[in-house]
Amino acid sequence: MTPPTLPSLSTFACLPPNILTTPTPFTLSVPSKEVNLLPRLARSGTFGIPSYYNTEADAASGRFGITRDWLINATSIWTSPSQFSWRSHEQYMNHFPNFRVNVTTPSDNELYDLHFAALFSKNESAVPIIFMHGWPGSWTEFAPMMDLLVDKYPTPEELPYHVVVPSIPDYGLSTRPGEVHKEINMTTAGEAMNQLMIELGFGESGYIAQGGDVGYFLARTMCGLFEECRAFHINMFFLTEEERAAVNDIPITPEEATQIEIGDKWGLEGSAYAAEHGTRPATIALALMSSPVAMLAWMGEKFVEWSDNRDPSYALSMDTILAQVSFYWYTESYGRSMWVYRALKSEVPSPLPPMPWSSTKPFGFSWFPVEIASLPQAWGDYLFENMVFHRRHARGGHFAALQEPAEFLQDIEDFLAIVKQNGTFAS
């Protein structure tokens, strides 16, 4: 399969005028030996014999996870050069300006070698915004949105934002050089992301944080702890037990009630993976990193279950799922990524730990109907005076930026307009 020719976006690699560091341009190029090895390893995998749980029992609902047939079909596509091309995905990633930069967090002197993609503006009033992904996704979740931005604002002079899309700490292409002898947590990871934005020259102007999944926790932490983070937009929300008790009697729409039921069901039946990640991170990571098929089964389940797949023609494509799993495999990052679950749920059962939160800085929320944790508007209005934006959508799920990039981008732009209007950023 020959990768398509993509337009150059090199004009958007223009570094901000107040930058404090010198990022190194980066091009992802997985060695051919590794690209060729993955399908060979996958072909040598076994799928287990058919059983009640992996064949027809609740196959449509996914109650017991993915089916044996799904895994066999996905592996067949993954190992067929005519059906899946890693080089095409690699070329697409490289079509955006990519960089690497070292940052050191002031609180603990920890060194991070961070990767990020970016669209930098030459507009003096451009608002900096950092987009942060989660597990099992990657920075490429935001690539369709970045393409839409370039279509809408074809030159750096027209782009009204500095768009920074990192691989979050210890995920994908972001690492900690040398031997790693300590865990990071949401605060230290948030500090690394904040320091990245400072080093890029956005310390004085400030910036906006956006995130879902792990990115949600990072965005709220950054806005709660760091003055430079002036506002945040999120598309996932976990209510604390106290917050849920405070709003339980406040009416919400039938659609929101259905979504809350989805979240409650996930907490009871769909969160076992998080308990394993949080309590036995070494075992699960070593097991999955030993076999591409094992990693595909574990991660593929989440891409299928958490995306909006009510209409099969709308569901995430197999090509997209395989590209995300391949990215984790080639970057050898699965073991590094377990810190999130250690930080959030190191003992089972347990509620989420207290986390930083700003009750004054503006935040916005985008509601997608197949999200595992959400915030109905009436509840948000009651709990948070600083919620300045809330919008419900008819389609989309946990991977909203992948499935609904146009609506996702419109939400971001509308939220930013409110934030600029209220004086958080000068017009």
Image (tube, helix red, strand yellow):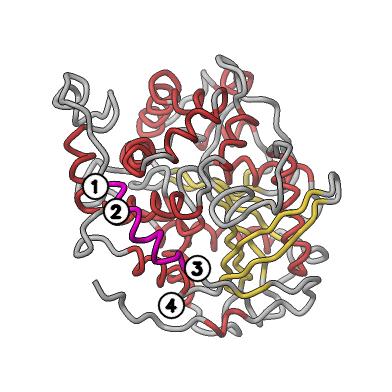
Q: Label 2: few (<14), some or many (≥20) within 10 Å?
A: many
The tag on residue 93 is none
Q: Could you give the CA–CA distance between mark 2 and mark 3, rounded to whole angstroms?
A: 19 Å
The residue labelled by disc 4 is 151
Q: Are marks 2 and 3 in contact (CB under 8 Å)?
A: no
Q: Earlier in the sequence, mark 4 or mark 2?
A: 2
Q: Please rate how many residues cluster around mark 4, counting C-alpha atoms within 10 Å: few if below 14, some from 14 to 19, many from 20.
A: few
Separation of residues labelled 2 and 1 (CA atoms) = 6 Å
Q: Reading the chain from its start, which is encountered first: label 4 or label 1?
A: 1
Q: Where are the magenta residues, as a range? A: 29-43
Magenta part mainly helix, strand or loop? helix
Q: Residue at x 65, y 36 (%)?
A: 384
Residue type at mark 1 is Arg
User: Which amino acid type is marked by label 2?
Assistant: Pro
- Residue appearing at x 56%, y 16% in the figure: 348
Residue 220 vs residue 260, the one in the foreground: 220
| Residue that appears at 43% across and 77% down | 151
Q: Is residue 38 magenta?
A: yes
Q: Which mark is residue 43?
A: 1
412 and 337: which is toward the camera? 337
Residue 25 percent across, percent down from the top left: 61, 75
Q: Earlier in the sequence, mark 3 or mark 1?
A: 3
Amino acid marked by disc 4: Asp
Quadrant assignment for the C terminus: bottom right
Q: Secondary structure at mark 2?
A: helix
Q: Residues within 10 Å of mark 1 (few under 14, many from 20)?
A: some
Ranked by sequence position, the earlier of labels 3 and 4 is 3
Compared to residue 76, the image places residue 163 above or below, namely below
Q: Which residue is mark 2?
A: 39
